[in-house]
Structures are given as structure tokens and as C-alpha cells.
Amino acid sequence: MYKVLLVDDEVDVREGLLQEMDWEACGFIVSGTAENGQEALELAENVEPDVVITDISMPFMTGLELAERLRERNPLLKLVILTGYDEFDYARQAVRLNVDEYLLKPFSADTLQELLLRIRRTIEEEMSRREDIRRLQEHYRTSLPMLGESFLASLLTRKLPKAAILEKARSYGLQLSGSAYVVAVAALHPPEEEPSPGPGQSLRASGDVDLMLHAMLNIAREMWEAQQLGSVFIHQGNLVLMAAGEGDAAWHCRLHDTLENVLRSIDHFLKLPVTIGVGSVAADASHLKNSFTDALLALDYRLLLGSGKVIDIRDVENRDCEKLRLDELKEQALIRSLKVGTAEELHGAVNAIFAELHESSYAYSDMQVYLLEVVTAVLRTAKDAGVQLDGLFGAGFQLHTEMFKYAGIHEMQAGFTDLCSRIMRHIASHRQFAYKELVEKAIRYTKENYMDPALSIQKVCAHLHISAGYFSGVFKKEVRVTYGQYLMGIRMEAAKDQLRSTELKAFEIAERVGFADPNYFSFCFKKGVGVSPKEYRSRSASEESVRP
């Protein structure tokens, strides 16, 4: 259903439109009504309508002025102008404002229904066109090789779900399917002094690192793709060779033979001193980050084994059993739960982290390192949120030490869950305090400046240095009304006080409480208080006179 805002200063017209039309049958729902342009402008900010149907002649703000203000806020909004024959020339100004439709009064329900159906078709066609454009842009972007390489590079530094990786790989036309994944890194090692470049001399003498890397890339890519091993790209000043395949003996043999050929070709054709580090085998693409980390670690062994070689991490470190690693996605789930999660989400995140320790048998030293990583993530989250652990758990509290006081994994998990729960509740409490402090500042600023006609939520947010969207949600959650409603209430109370205690005229009071238009002040006062300012003053004077 698309939302409609009805605006007309005649109550009969508004009620007639509401009762005579089957709005839902046309695909619409009336989300609000207003009796003047100023009220409609404020209401539109809350209800965010898709269509505004407005009379052309209204107090405080005409339909055309309203249309212009609304169009500035939302260019996609559909505007319908209601006008009489004597206002038709006036309504032609609507062309300048790109008003979508206009209706001449009086009009029948059938005429309005036809107009609504026409607008609905227009909205749906525009949505369809925007979706088509979005898809074309997405297809264009994903077809660019540069973005494909950027995606592959991202897998070296963060973990993504396997399904998301394969979907992206298909979009970019990358080969990332298989049961085994290996990352190799070809690095230029520190250069030795060389003479000026000459025929047959080293490309290194030119000093252009980018030129050297791209020359290496051309050689490696040609050989890598010929063997259908995967992708080759430049990342952080090194050449990355990413392989995906079946993982059988023949595949591993082809992988290492190709790496040796790449190394020899770079040395033969480019005369560049290069060492290639080969990472561990990952079971799926979501663990490419681990293989990349191991490839960089393998490169460090050139200090012991010498450079100009292919060094496989499995040859230099004992990798008989799978290395225990903290899963990045599970770590992110734990951090998210501590910050904004529920108790159930926190328990689920902790269970997922400890499941690694329950399901497999690891060396105690590996488990210690794993748990220290988990604790470090919690400490970092607590610090970012401003949690003082000494204040929460007592002076001298050390979470790292506390974790290893338990008798077994099950007791450790229960204790860790309890500690995390207390930290989560403290973060939530601290956040609630921050909300209250923010709202108190806004209220204080509003009470000091409500007499300014230009005071608005945007001005308050500029003063507080926060976004209007964030502030709106926080304010309504704490005060139970929107900021606009709160500001109006402050101004009405101030106006009532001045009506009771001064002899100022209504237009003078309007100016003192933040209304640039005295007529709009009278309208808002009567709507909010139930009587006009004059009637309110008379009633207050009568009540005062009868008091003993």
C-alpha cells in the first residue's frame, strides 16, 4: 500500500474524500490529514507519504507553497493539486513545480479513482525503472576486473560466509569453486646494489616497483591461467597467486610445479630476486585469510632457508593437525552481542566459540592462545564502550587470569558467559545514560531557545553535533513524543503563561514564543488548548476573579 496525505482546510472535503473512496482497492492508505499547508509540512516529516493531495487555497501556506517545500525534501513524491475553475490559471504554476496531477472541483469519486490508479501505475513503473537501472549498474560494476581483484583482496583480510563468497565470485566471473584453497605470495626481497640498467640487466635497477610488479603479474597470470588454477593479482606490494581446485595429489603437484615455473621465469626474464611463500590448505573459500597469513609466515623463513625459493608452510612447520584459529565471523557475533545484543544472542555467540574446543582435541598451548584471543576481543569491546572492569568486577580484576581459574572447559564457558553478560548489561546501561544525557541537553537547549522561530530539529542536531535521524529515534524513545510535538508543547505552555500574566496582544505573544506568523500561532493554540488565545485569557481572568 502506498501512503497518502490529504490536505484541505475544509473539513467536509477531507471527510468526503475519506468516506467516498475505497482507498485500499486503489492500492493506497490514508496515513494522515491536515487542514493547512504548515500542518501538512510537519506531518509529512513523520508519515513520509508517497502521494500528497492538497487544496490550492489554504491559510498559512498555499498548496503550491506546500508542493514546492515537499518537492525540495522528496523529489520522488507524487503531488496532486485540488482547484476550482476560478483558480485554474493560478494552478498552472504547478507545471513549474512538476506537479503530477490536478483535479478541478467538483469531481466525482470515479474521477479520483482513475487518477489514483494512474498515479499508482506511474509509481510502479518508476520503481521498476530504478530497479532496472540499479541492476545494470551492478552488472557493470561487477564486470570490471579491478573490482573482482578488490573482492579477492578482501578475502585475504576478512572472513565472509561461504555462500556469499561463491555468489560474489559468480557475479565477478571468478574461479572460486573447489574443495581446496591455497594462497601463495611472491615477494621481492630487499635489493642489493646494482649498476645502472643496461641490456640484459635486472629490471630492479630501474627502481620502479610498480613496473616490476606488473611485469611479474603478466608472467605469473599467463602461466597460472594456463593451468586453470585460479587468480593472480597485486596486493600490498606483493604478487598474490590464489588457487582453488579439487585438492587431490595431482592438483597439488600441478600447483607446486607452476609456482616453480613462475619463480624461474621471473628470474630468467626479469632478473628479479623473488621468493614465494605458500600458505596452508583451506577447506573452503571463507578460510582464505588463514592461508594468506600462513603464506606471509612462510616468507619469513627465507631468513633461514635463503631467498629465491618456493617455501611451503607445511614443509617448515608441523601441520599434522588443523591449526586452532578464532573464527572471524564468530568473533564479530560475540562483539555485536556485547554491544547491542540480547541475552539469547550472547549465549549463542559464546556457545559457537566454545564449540571449537568441545568438538576437537587440541594442545593445551593452542587452546590458551585461542582463549586469549577471545578475551582480547572482549576487552577491546569493553574499552571501546567505556567500561571500567575494575569498577565492574573489583580492583585488580584481570580477565585473562580469571579465564584460567576454572577446572574445565564447561566451567570456563559458564563463567565466561556470566562475565560477558555483566559487561553487556553495563554497556546497555551506559548507552541508556548517554541517551538520557543527550536528551537532557536537547531539552535544555530547547527551553533556552524556543522563542527562536527558526528553531528546528536540524538546528538542535547541529548544536549537539549528531545526525537528525539518530536524534529523532533517541528523543522519541526517551520522551515518548517527537521533537516537533515537544517543541510545540513548550511554546504553548509559554504562551499560556504570558496570556495569564501579561496584557500583551496575541501577535506579540506569538513572536515571543517562536511563531513568525501570528495567524498560525492562533491556529496551533486553538488546536492544542481547545480555545482561542483570547478565550483562554478571558477564562483565566474569570477563574482568577472568583478565587478567595
Image (tube, helix red, strand yellow):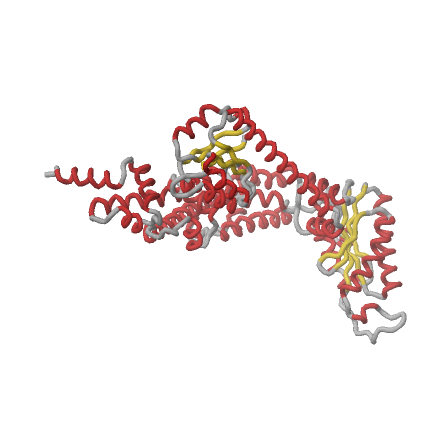
Relative to 218, is 348 on the left or the right?
left
Relative to 134, is 437 on the left or the right?
left
Relative to 192, is 392 on the left or the right?
left
Looking at the picture, tell me which residue is in the foreground, 22 or 418: 22
Where residue 82 sits: x, y (%)? 48, 35
- In the image, farthest residue toward the left: 548
Where residue 91 sits: x, y (%)? 49, 40
Total residue callouts:
0
Q: Residue at x 45, y 24 (%)?
A: 19
In the image, residue 329 sits, relative to residue 268, either above or below, namely above
Q: Quadrant of the C terminus?
A: top left
**From where the camera sits, is residue 463 visible?**
yes
Which quadrant of the figure has residue 348?
top right
Q: Residue at x 56, y 51 (%)?
A: 376
In the image, residue 176 sits, relative to residue 194, either above or below, namely above
Q: Residue at x 86, y 55 (%)?
A: 260
In the image, residue 498 sits, relative to residue 51, either above or below, namely below
Q: Quadrant of the N terminus?
A: top right
Relative to 226, is 437 on the left or the right?
left
Looking at the picture, tell me which residue is in the foreground, 224 or 386: 224
Which quadrant of the figure has residue 188?
bottom right
Looking at the picture, tell me which residue is in the foreground, 331 or 437: 437
Where residue 233 sits: x, y (%)? 77, 54
Where residue 453 sits: x, y (%)? 36, 51
**From where the camera sits, is residue 318 visible?**
no
